[in-house]
Image (tube, grey):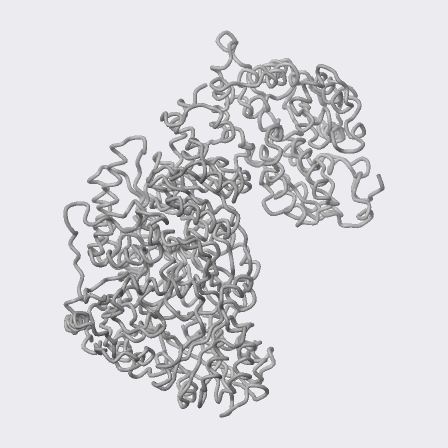
């Protein structure tokens, strides 16, 4: 992988600066090193041999959230995220990588059970090899931000992984058609299990049968970090598993996974040089992928609600209507062009009033492993988001990406808001006409 | 020199993470949105004006050059350090400090983007008129630095017409306040020279913007043309019909094609050009206006014209214009936008030449531009990786500027000169003109540390001056005689007193007896009058009333009604004093209406400033500096005025009530979408005490009949709601106005003073003046926040307490610093006084010390021998 191959795309930047207003990082720092125009100028400088590879490039290359807001605001639609990730890959080759990342991508993320064990081990303060690794990586920050500092840690981190309770396999549904594969993201598996239950319930309402997949990480974290070989290994593992399935489509309730799964084809094409297997063995084809948001929007007439919506702020219990606002995950709104669907789902629900927040499509600063190395910057970005949330006075902050949910929950606690963060599946699965305590 | 010690001191001021010195860091500040490149040595990110001041002091002490920078979207290289200096990035100055819609101003930090302030104002039903196409990302500091325009400027004017004041860090590292919500502070128009100075005279750390109430309704139309000349004819036809659309945007076939290819919005792809025409105002009469526009378009060769039926359709029509740059951007790796300007009737020729130039250099070009003010934006496509193409677009850009200048235009309408167009300054300015501008730079920045080597070119870089073909100047009648008289006086060591019909000469100190009076009265030529392009250039000795007569033949006028001596005042005196009446709220003051001027400097040389197109940002705005300078910097010989079509209907609404009720009604009117031409309150009886006696509120509306009648009716209801008694309606003459009698009543007294503050200070100001001076008569110019008070006598101690005694008027730096909302910048000026009075008294409240120093330095630079008698203003 060499960014020289992207010289044309990089040169398309006319330095008009329109990316600056859209970039959450630039709005936090005000420095060119934190915005598309600056990053592209450096890439061009590298190609034109004015800028040498070195540690000075780490910040400009790795502070990008990858939210894609710059591209959406760019006259020439320069695909900054793809370019920057290629450059990260080259940075790792030219300047060096931390071996610890290799362990994460090669030995932890591909294996759901190991990942859960590692997270739990760290949470419980156990000194095992895995926990040491996960601790060193700031895995807790990735998965739970302030989990380590919060009370009731163990309560919040479920004792067993989602797929230890819901064993991968076939589950009968009440729908007439459709065999659906449920791709379980790492966040759902380890932390947001209530979302997982809600999604599975909804899928079973809609589909004839649901297959809970035994998938590993989608590969997005590895790709974002610039580790192309690791990303391809994760992709290949999933794709090969998909070929063995008999499903009409695959649904995931993680918009980040969905966005990345949909991009498998293009990513595979862009990164094929990084794969030693590639010469002999073609990457399997990508099946139909649906984000839960679009799937639910299409089939919402067919779902039924179950238990009461839990954990609303006590002072608001029994009050109607409940105020709902929505945060657009980057990988939904720009990654997949989904935005209308979530509004259609939320607007006009009984006893709920939808209130749009300012800058709803701005990144929350979660951005997967971003907080790993850029905690403070990530918090500045989050604070802007939470101010916008607070302005709506929402009881429920709804979104469709577990990574965003972690970050937003942290934001709620940070700002001490009376707002509950939940997944859009939960809104549809859990009855909200009557609200009970707890 | 930049060394570790300097870096350490910078870090101590702004913090470690706010100083960047790495090689990568410097690469990131080597560019802006132009093609200019240059590496700084260090970049700092200060948080407030005191940090900026400290950084400036340190840099100047270390002998390091400074370049201020906002979001770096400059299109002429203005934010690039070409001398390996220090960049002060203003990106942390991003707060809106105050919004005051009734008083029509907002206070912002320079790092706030134009769009952010628009969004904040929209919540109050207000807006800020300049709306550059880059408003999403361009900061207000940059807007002020470049004197930005935008589509709406056709109707409302450019940035300089909408900046009321600023906080400035000077080259000495002093923090000073210039202007504020109160209009026209005494002294030189420093904000006039600072706006458009491209960050070369100081660093702006706060801005006071003039805001306006939003219009009630808007009609958007798309006119389609088979030939581009027909579109240009429509543009001229619309303006000469006296209709001022809020926008008149044109796109040519290349752009239409590109837009339709990337994001179709229904432009016909076989058209040669489309015009987006928008009119806004009150609902009443707007449709008639739109219908007239449609008729004019069809009469001038339009294929068809469609009107947006709703907001969605309107968005769709605009979508193409907004996306034009993007659509073009996809056709090639890079594009260069040139922003040369021509008088709008010359647009067809200009476009033809642009096409020919592009063909000559073999580069593709698309045209999207502000047709209403003749501001071109040819987009030249190229690949910056190819040195030959880069060279080619530079040459093409140069030739386009030359072509526009030869058509009577200028080299830059919006984007500034910066580094990119420096050499092209020779196309429009003579050696002497440029030398005068250099002196201004010298006055502000004696050590040439602030953004050096920008704007003003080195003398004749390419072997000789370009041909400047300008009528008027020394050849106009009366000018060479005046020049001789000035030179003779200079040689004889006498000073010069500029005279005309005696309307302002007595405002000067006449202590010196060695004074040669030099009269403007021989300068009566109409040098150029172009009704279609709505400008007139006339000698300074021509009286305003004769000028109005000339303009009247084409149903035009110069929208100024000086309160006093309106029959005899010369246009030169209008310019030199900057006088304005209550109609200022609608039409602006002379500073807003002058496009350019010539003057004789202290060596009797003729100096040109500005030009004759509405949008002109080439060089320092010497026009603004000269206007209101009371003849202290030079002798104005001719002025080019922007003129307007006479409104067909003028209606005055009058209602009676207490002073408080009148002011309350005025406040409501200020933020209502009615756009009155004037709001004035005057006592209903002679010799009134200010307290409880009744006042008459007069609100004037000028425009098209239907709209004016509707506005007057709405106004009638509004004033009734505010507690005034039933309103009466009267028509009046546009040139004479409806206030002659009111001002004549004041003019019976020997002393008239004018106190200015924002409108919500009006009552307070009246109270202060009443307590201190017990005036004999009043006129409250509510629309401009001004109080006129007439007195039979003005004893020394009374004038002293009026100007200095009360804290209220005091405007020393200490009280102003924390007085953003406490009347900062309020001031008082004596408008009329017996001749003897000015020999012994200042005629205005004190000018803050640092501002006074700056004023003196400018005087010293432009008139080192103190040739021109100028009183205490300079």
Instruction: Using the image as rendered, state which of residue A312 and residue A205 is in the foreground.
Output: A312
> Which residue appears at 44% of the width and 69% of the height?
B183
- Looking at the image, is A257 positioned above or below residue B855? above
Lateral position of residue B611 relative to residue B814, left or right: left
| x and y, in percent, of residue A203 in the image | 71, 28
Q: Nearer the viewer, residue B118 or A398?
A: B118
Q: Is residue B68 left or right of residue B428?
A: right
- Tell me where residue A119 appears, x and y as whole percent: 72, 22
Give residue B862's position: percent from left, percent from top. 27, 63
Tell me if I can see residue B283 in this picture: no
Residue found at x 30% / y 70%: B632
Q: Compared with residue B697, is residue B439 higher up or lower down, i.e. above or below?
A: above
B380 or B865, which is in the foreground? B865
Quarter containing the N terminus of chain B: top left
Judged from this view, the residue extending furthest toward the bottom is B686
Q: Is residue B286 shown to the viewer in this render?
A: yes
Of the 4 image quadrants, the one containing the C terminus of chain B is bottom left
Q: How many marks?
A: 0
Q: Residue furthest right?
A: A437
Q: Quadrant of residue A204?
A: top right
Please report the residue visible at 75 percent of the width from the left and 35 percent of the height from the top.
A429
* Residue B405 at x, y percent in the picture: 22, 54
Quarter where residue B767 is shown: bottom right
- Name which quarter of the figure residue B869 lies in: bottom left
């Amino acid at each position: 992988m060499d960014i020289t191959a992207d010289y044309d795309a990089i040169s398309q930047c006319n330095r008009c600066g329109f990316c600056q207003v859209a970039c959450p990082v630039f709005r936090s720092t005000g420095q060119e090193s934190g915005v598309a125009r600056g990053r592209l100028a450096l890439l061009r400088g590298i190609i034109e041999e004015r800028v040498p590879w070195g540690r000075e490039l780490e910040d400009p290359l790795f502070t990008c959230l990858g939210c894609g807001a710059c591209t959406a605001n760019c006259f020439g639609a320069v695909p900054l995220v793809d370019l920057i990730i290629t450059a990260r890959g080259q940075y790792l080759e030219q300047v060096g990588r931390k071996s610890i990342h290799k362990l994460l991508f090669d030995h932890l993320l591909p294996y759901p059970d190991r990942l859960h064990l590692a997270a739990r081990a760290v949470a419980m303060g156990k000194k095992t090899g895995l926990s040491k690794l996960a601790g060193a990586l700031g895995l807790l920050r990735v998965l739970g931000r302030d989990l380590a500092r919060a009370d009731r840690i163990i309560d919040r981190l479920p004792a067993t992984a989602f797929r230890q309770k819901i064993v991968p396999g076939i589950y009968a549904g009440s729908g007439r058609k459709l065999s659906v594969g449920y791709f379980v993201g790492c966040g759902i598996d380890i932390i947001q299990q209530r979302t997982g239950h809600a999604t599975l319930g909804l899928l079973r309402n809609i589909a004839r049968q649901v297959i809970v997949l035994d998938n590993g990480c989608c590969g997005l974290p590895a790709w974002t970090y610039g580790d192309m070989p690791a990303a391809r290994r994760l992709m290949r593992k999933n794709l090969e598993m998909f070929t063995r399935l008999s499903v009409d489509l695959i649904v995931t309730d993680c918009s980040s996974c969905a966005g990345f799964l949909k991009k498998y084809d293009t990513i595979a094409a862009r990164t094929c040089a990084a794969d030693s297997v590639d010469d002999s063995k073609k990457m399997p084809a990508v099946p139909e992928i649906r984000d839960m948001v679009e799937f639910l929007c299409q089939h919402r007439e067919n779902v039924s609600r179950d238990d009461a919506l839990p954990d609303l702020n006590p002072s608001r219990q029994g009050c109607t209507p409940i105020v709902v606002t929505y945060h657009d995950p980057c990988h939904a709104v720009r990654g997949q062009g989904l935005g209308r669907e979530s509004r259609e789902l939320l607007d006009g629900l009984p006893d709920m009033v939808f209130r749009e927040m300012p800058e709803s499509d701005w990144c929350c600063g979660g951005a997967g492993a971003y907080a790993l190395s850029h905690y403070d910057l990530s918090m500045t970005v989050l604070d802007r988001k939470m101010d916008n949330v607070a302005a709506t006075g929402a009881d429920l902050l709804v979104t469709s990406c577990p990574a965003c949910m972690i970050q937003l929950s942290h934001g709620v606690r940070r700002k001490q808001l009376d707002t509950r963060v939940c997944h859009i599946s939960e809104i549809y699965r859990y009855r909200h006409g009557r609200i009970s305590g707890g | 020199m930049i060394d570790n010690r300097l870096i350490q001191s910078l870090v101590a001021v702004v913090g470690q993470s706010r100083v960047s010195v790495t090689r990568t860091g410097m690469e990131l500040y080597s560019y802006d949105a132009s093609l200019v490149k240059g590496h700084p040595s260090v970049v700092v990110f200060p948080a407030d004006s005191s940090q900026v001041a400290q950084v400036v002091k340190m840099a100047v002490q270390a002998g390091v050059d400074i370049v201020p920078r906002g979001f770096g979207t400059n299109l002429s290289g203005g934010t690039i350090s070409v001398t390996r200096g220090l960049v002060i990035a203003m990106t942390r100055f991003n707060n809106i400090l105050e919004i005051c819609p009734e008083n029509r101003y907002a206070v912002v930090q320079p790092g706030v983007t134009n769009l952010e302030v628009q969004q904040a104002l929209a919540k109050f039903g207000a807006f800020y008129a300049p709306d550059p196409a880059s408003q999403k990302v361009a900061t207000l500091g940059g807007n002020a630095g470049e004197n930005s325009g935008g589509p709406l400027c056709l109707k409302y004017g450019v940035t300089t017409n909408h900046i009321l004041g600023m906080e400035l860090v000077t080259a000495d590292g002093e923090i000073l306040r210039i202007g504020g919500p109160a209009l026209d502070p005494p002294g030189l128009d420093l904000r006039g020279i600072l706006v458009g100075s491209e960050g070369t005279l100081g660093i702006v750390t706060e801005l006071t913007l003039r805001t306006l109430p939003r219009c009630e309704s808007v009609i958007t139309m798309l006119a389609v043309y088979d030939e581009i000349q027909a579109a240009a004819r429509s543009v001229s036809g619309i303006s000469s019909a006296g209709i001022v659309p809020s926008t008149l945007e044109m796109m040519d076939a290349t752009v239409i094609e590109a837009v339709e290819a990337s994001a179709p919005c229904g432009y016909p792809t076989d058209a040669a050009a489309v015009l987006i025409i928008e009119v806004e105002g009150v609902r009443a009469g707007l449709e008639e206006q739109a219908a007239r526009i449609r008729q004019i378009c069809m009469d001038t060769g339009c294929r068809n014209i469609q009107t947006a039926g709703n907001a969605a359709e309107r968005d769709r029509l605009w979508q193409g214009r907004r996306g034009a740059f993007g659509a073009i951007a996809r056709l090639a790796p890079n594009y260069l936008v040139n922003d040369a300007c021509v008088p709008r009737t010359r647009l067809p020729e200009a476009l033809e030449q642009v096409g020919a130039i592009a063909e000559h250099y073999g580069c593709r070009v698309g045209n999207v531009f502000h047709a209403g003010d003749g501001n071109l934006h040819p987009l030249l496509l190229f690949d910056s990786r190819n040195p030959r193409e880069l060279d080619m677009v530079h040459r093409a850009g140069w030739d386009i500027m030359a072509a526009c200048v030869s058509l009577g235009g200028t080299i830059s309408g919006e984007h500034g000169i910066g580094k990119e167009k420096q050499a092209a300054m020779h196309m429009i300015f003579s050696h002497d003109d440029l030398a005068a501008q250099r002196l201004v730079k010298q006055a502000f920045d004696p050590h040439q540390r602030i953004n050096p080597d920008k704007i003003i070119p080195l003398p004749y870089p390419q072997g000789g001056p370009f041909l400047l073909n300008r009528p008027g100047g020394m050849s106009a009648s009366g000018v060479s005689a005046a020049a001789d008289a000035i030179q003779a006086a200079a040689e004889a060591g006498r000073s010069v007193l500029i005279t005309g019909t005696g309307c302002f000469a007595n405002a000067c100190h006449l202590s010196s007896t060695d004074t040669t009076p030099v009269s403007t009265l021989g300068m009566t030529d109409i040098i150029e009058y172009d009704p279609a392009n709505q400008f007139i250039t006339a000698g300074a000795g021509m009286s305003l009333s004769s000028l109005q007569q000339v303009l009247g033949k084409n149903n035009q006028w110069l929208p100024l009604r000086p309160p006093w001596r309106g029959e005899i005042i010369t246009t030169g005196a209008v310019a030199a004093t900057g006088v304005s009446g209550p109609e200022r709220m609608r039409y602006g003051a002379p500073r807003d209406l002058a496009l350019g001027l010539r003057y004789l400097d202290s060596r009797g040389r003729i100096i040109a400033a500005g030009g004759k197109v509405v949008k002109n940002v080439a060089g320092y705005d010497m026009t603004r500096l000269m206007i209101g300078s009371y003849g202290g910097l030079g002798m104005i010989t001719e002025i080019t005025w922007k003129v307007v079509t006479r409104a067909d209907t003028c209606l005055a609404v009058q209602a009676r009530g207490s002073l408080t009720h009148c002011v309350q009604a005025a406040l409501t009117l200020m933020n209502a979408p009615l756009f009155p031409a004037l709001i004035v309150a005057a006592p209903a009886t002679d010799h009134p005490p200010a307290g409880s006696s009744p006042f008459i509120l007069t609100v004037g509306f000028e425009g098209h009949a239907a709209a004016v009648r509707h506005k007057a009716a709405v106004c009638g209801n509004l004033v009734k709601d505010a507690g005034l008694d039933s309103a009466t309606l009267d028509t009046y003459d546009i040139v004479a106005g409806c206030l002659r009698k009111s001002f004549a009543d004041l003019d019976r007294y020997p002393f008239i003073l004018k106190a200015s503050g924002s409108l919500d200070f009006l009552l307070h100001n009246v109270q202060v003046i009443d307590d201190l001076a017990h005036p004999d008569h009043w006129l409250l110019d509510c629309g401009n926040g001004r109080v006129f008070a007439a007195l039979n006598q003005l004893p020394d101690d009374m004038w002293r307490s009026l100007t200095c005694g009360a804290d209220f008027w005091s405007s020393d730096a200490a009280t102003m610093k924390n007085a953003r909302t406490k009347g900062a910048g309020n001031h008082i000026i004596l408008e009329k006084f017996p001749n003897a009075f000015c020999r012994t008294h200042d005629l205005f409240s004190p000018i803050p010390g640092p501002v006074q120093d700056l004023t003196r330095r400018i005087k010293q630079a432009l008139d080192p021998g103190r040739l021109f008698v100028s009183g205490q203003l300079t």
